[in-house]
Amino acid sequence: MIRRMRGSGTILTLIVSGFIVLVSAIILAVCLGVIALHEARSGADLAAISAAQAAVDSNLTASESMVCAEAGIGAPPPLSIESCSMTIVGVHVAVTVTVAAPFPWRIPGLPVEVAATSHAGNLP
């Protein structure tokens, strides 16, 4: 009876090892997605603040395209500006910027990029 079970430990070890590798890869993919989301959020904040500062520096006479160009300069290199809008009411300005960050891995079922939106300024 003992001779029939020879080698079963090797198969069991391979199955458990494969399961551990699979779970580790899934956890790593989730962690990389969280990092990309944080990068997109911080980049959107930087771009919105940069754009709002450009609007204020021009005494609120800057065009929306100029302010959005400044937002593109404020975003770190791997990020891309998806949308940008500026609202001026009296002496108050608000800038909304949406930024996309590339997802580090190309895995079926996961997004290619993650996006975040940020607002700078206040309206009455």
Image (cartoon, helix red, strand yellow):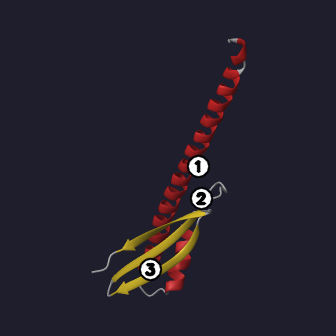
Q: Residues within 10 Å of mark 3 (few under 14, many from 20)?
A: many
Query: Is label 2 or label 3 in front?
Result: 2
Earlier in the chain: of badge 2 and badge 3, it is 3
For the C terminus, which image quadrant? bottom left
Tell me the residue that label 1 is attached to: 29
- Density class for disc 2 (Cα within 10 Å; few <14, some 14-19, many ≥20) is few
Q: Which is nearer the eye, 83 or 2? A: 2
Could you give the CA–CA distance between mark 3 and mark 1, rounded to whole angstroms? 39 Å
Residue 9 x/y as whole percent: 67, 21
- Is 4 drawn above or below residue 31 in the view shown? above
Residue named by callout 2: 110
SS at badge 1: helix
Amino acid carrying label 1: it is: Ala
Residue 59 can be seen in this image: no
Decide: few, some or many residues near mark 1? Use Cα within 10 Å; few <14, some 14-19, many ≥20. some
Quadrant of residue 100 within the rendered picture = bottom right
Q: Is residue 83 above or below residue 75?
A: below
Q: Is residue 11 left or right of residue 37?
A: right
Inspect the image, locate mark 2, and give the three-letter code of the amino acid beneath it.
Answer: Leu
**Residue denoted by label 3:** 55
Instruction: Give the residue at x 53% y 52%.
Output: 35
Mark 2 secondary-structure assignment: loop
Q: Assess whether mark 2 and mark 1 are in contact (beta carbons under 8 angstroms).
A: yes
Q: Secondary structure at mark 3?
A: helix
Q: Is residue 28 visible?
A: yes
The amino acid on which the numbered mark 3 sits, given as a three-letter code, is Ala
Tell which circle, 1 or 2, labels the residue nearer the N-terminal end.
1
Residue mark closest to the camera, 3 vs 1? 1
Residue at (44, 75) in percent of width and height: 96
